[in-house]
Amino acid sequence: MKLHASGEDYLEAILMLQKKQGMVRSVDVSRHMEVSKPSVCHAVATLQDGGFLTMDEDHFLHLTNSGREVAEKIYERHCFFTEQLIAAGVDPKTAEADACRIEHVISNESFLRLKETAAQQQD
């Protein structure tokens, strides 16, 4: 199953919330992403069908191995681009929003090259 940017955003949000508070429910995702509960329910069902997410009997969300892999990849890109844009002088709020768009469209090759270049510049 190919994920769209919105699916990646949901996985990333769940990962971030798990790191922050441990257990995550749909209502937490709804608040964090500022979307409706029905939107989260639809996304959760789609992500479950795709094998990226499970929900236990207490309605807590859990990333599967493949879901965690996607979420961590997107989160790494998000953090990288946010930091780079802020370092370049972009307003943090704008940097955050732009990073969220960039993280979904950049190729893996381009991301790795940019990451390497940034690491070399720090040395």
Image: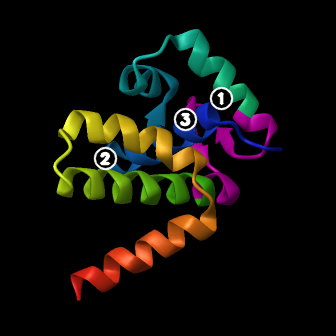
43 left or right of 9 in image: right
Label 3 to label 2: alpha-carbon separation: 15 Å
Frontmost residue, 60 versus 119: 119
Q: Which residues are magenta?
A: 47-68
Specify the amino acid type for callout 3: Tyr
Instruction: Please tell me whether mark 3 sits on a helix, a strand or a loop.
Output: helix
Instruction: Please tell me whether mark 1 sits on a helix, a strand or a loop.
Output: helix
Q: Mark number for residue 44?
A: 1
Q: Which residue is at 65% across, 25% downward?
A: 43
60 left or right of 52 in image: left
Circle 1/circle 3 CB separation < 8 Å: yes
Q: In the rendered image, which quarter contains the C terminus?
A: bottom left
Label 2: how many residues lie within 10 Å, few (<14), some (14-19) or many (20+)? Answer: few
Q: Is residue 83 above or below residue 2?
A: below
Residue 109 on the magenta segment: no
Q: Is residue 4 visible?
A: yes
Specify the amino acid type for callout 2: Lys
The colour mode here is rainbow
Q: Which residue is at 74% across, 36% downward?
A: 48
Mark 3 = which residue?
Answer: 10
Residue 62 on the magenta segment: yes
Coordinates of residue 116 in the picture (x, y in percent): 43, 79
Instruction: Please tell me whether mark 2 sits on a helix, a strand or a loop.
Output: helix
Coordinates of residue 86 in the picture (x, y in percent): 21, 51
Q: If you read the primary sequence from the N terminus, does the residue marked by circle 2 or circle 1 appear first?
A: 2
Mark 2 = which residue?
Answer: 20
Q: Which residue is at 27% across, 51% downward?
A: 85
Coordinates of residue 64 in the picture (x, y in percent): 66, 53
Label 2 to label 1: alpha-carbon separation: 20 Å
